[in-house]
Amino acid sequence: MGHSGVTWSEILRVSLRYTFAFGRGHLSTFLSSLSMLGLVLAIALLITVLSVMNGFDKEMRERILSLVPHITIYSQLPMSQWQEQLSLVSGHPGVTAVTPFTQFDALLMRGNNIETTKGIGLDIDRENVSGQLVTSLQYAALQDFSGESRGLILGAAMADKLKVERGDKLTLIVPSGGAAVASHASRFETVTVSAILNTGTELDQTAAIVHLELASRLAGLDHAVSGLRVSTADIFQATRIGWELVRKLPRGYYVTNWMMTHGNLYAAIQLSRDLITFLLFSIIAVAAFNVVSSLVLVVLDKQGDIAILRTLGTSPSNIAWIFVLQGAMIGLVGVILGSAVGISLSLAVPGVVAWLEHLLDIRFLNTDVYPVSFLPVDLLPGDILVVGSVAFVMCVLAAIYPALRAARMAPAAILHRV
C-alpha cells in the first residue's frame, strides 16, 4: 500500500471513526449501532434456544434412557432358565449390563383412590439396577426398599394421584389373565411405599417397582421372569445389537428396543432442533442484510469524505477496505455481545421459568404431555463457536457490496455536486 501513501493503521482509524462515536459522524454510528443490535438479538436468541433444545436432547439420553432399557428381550413362554440366557447375552461386546425383570398389569388402591399401572419387578441387589436408581432416589429410601420384601418404589406423579407418602401402605391388585396364568384368580397384596421416584420425567407418571420375586409370584410365573433388560454402550446401536442377540438366543425369543418406545419422541426433538436452528439462522441472515442496507446509507452519507480521500491519493481498494473493516467490526462486536447475552440468558432461563411457575402457581411443562417437568439447558461451546463464526462471516460478506460501491465512486462527480 506504499504507493498510495495510505497505511493499514490509517484505514483502521477511519473505519473505527465511522463505526463508533469517535468525533463526528453520528448518522454512521447510529446505523452501525442499529446493525449491531439486530445481530446481538439474533445471536442471543439462537444460542438460548439451541441450549434449551440441547437440554431436551441430553435429558432424553442421560435421564430417561438411563432408566429405560435400551434393549428388552422377551420369550414366548415364561423365561424359567433366564440365568443361562443372561450369561449368554452378557458375553456380547456391546452389552454393558443385563438384568431380569417381570412386568404385570395392576391396580393400586388407597382408600377411594384407584390408579392403573404397569408394575415391574427388578432385582435391586444387582449393581447396575441400584446404580441407576440411586441417581434418582435418596440412599436411605433405597435401603428401605431393599430391606422390605413387600416394598414399592412409586413414581412421584402416581404418588400425588393416590395421595400417599413414604411409609404408607397400598393394596396392589393383579387381575387374572394378561401376564398371569388365566386359571388363577386375581391376586391382592399389601405393599409399603418405601421410596418415591422423582426423576422429573414421564417415568414419574407410571413407575411402580417391586422386588423381582414378588412380581413373579403376583404375575403367576413362580420363579420365571418376563424377560431381560439390556443396557448398551452406544444407544444408537441398539437395533443392530438386538438382532445379534436374537441370533445367539434359542428359538422363541424376540427383542424390542428404546427406539420402538421412545424413538418418535427423540426424533421429534431432533427435528424441532433442526427446524428452529434453520429458522434462527435465517434471522441472523436478516441481521446481516441489515448490515448491507446500513453500510450503503453510510457510503451515501460519507461520499464527500470518500471524494476527498480519493483526491488525496487514496486508492479504490483502500476505500473498499474501510467499509469491509467496518462490516467486520459490526460483526465482531455483535458476536461478542450476542454471545455474552445468549450465555447469560441460557443460564438464567431455568431459574426464571421455575420462579414464574412458583409465582403463578402453574406448571409450564408437565410430564403428562412433555418428557420432562422442567426446562433443561445444555450450553455447548461448539454451538457458540459455530453461531458466532457464521454471523461474523455473514457480516463481512454483507460489507462487500457497499465497499465495492464506495470504491467505484467518481470523486470528480461528487465534488462537482457539492
Image (cartoon, rainbow, N blue to C red):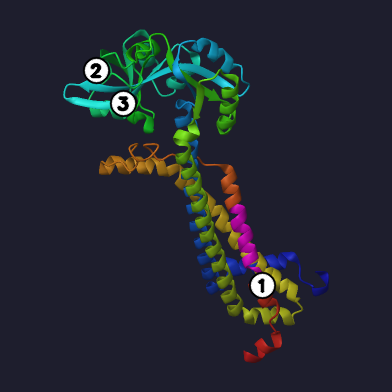
Q: Position of residue 36 (x, y in %)?
A: 53, 62
Q: Are marks 3 and 1 in contact (CB under 8 Å)?
A: no
Secondary element at tag 2? strand
Query: Which badge, 1 or 2, is on the more N-terminal residue?
Result: 2
Please state which of residues 24 and 140 is positioned toward the viewer in this rendering. Answer: 140
Amino acid carrying label 3: it is Thr
Asked whether the viewer can see residue 202, the reply is yes
Q: Position of residue 146 (x, y in %)?
A: 38, 11
Residue at point 48%, 57% (across, down): 41
Q: Which residue is mark 2?
A: 170
Q: Is residue 14 above or below residue 115?
A: below
Amino acid carrying label 2: it is Leu
The C terminus, quarter of image: bottom right
Q: Main secondary structure of the magenta part?
A: helix
Q: Judge from the rendering whether residue 393 lies leftward or rightward of residue 204; answer left or right.
A: right
Q: Pick out the residue farthest to the bottom.
A: 416
Q: Which residue is mark 1?
A: 403
Query: Which badge, 3 or 1, is on the more N-terminal residue?
Result: 3
Amino acid carrying label 1: it is Ala
Q: Are marks 2 and 3 in contact (CB under 8 Å)?
A: no
- Write down the region rendered in magenta: 388-401
Does the magenta run of residues contain 155?
Answer: no
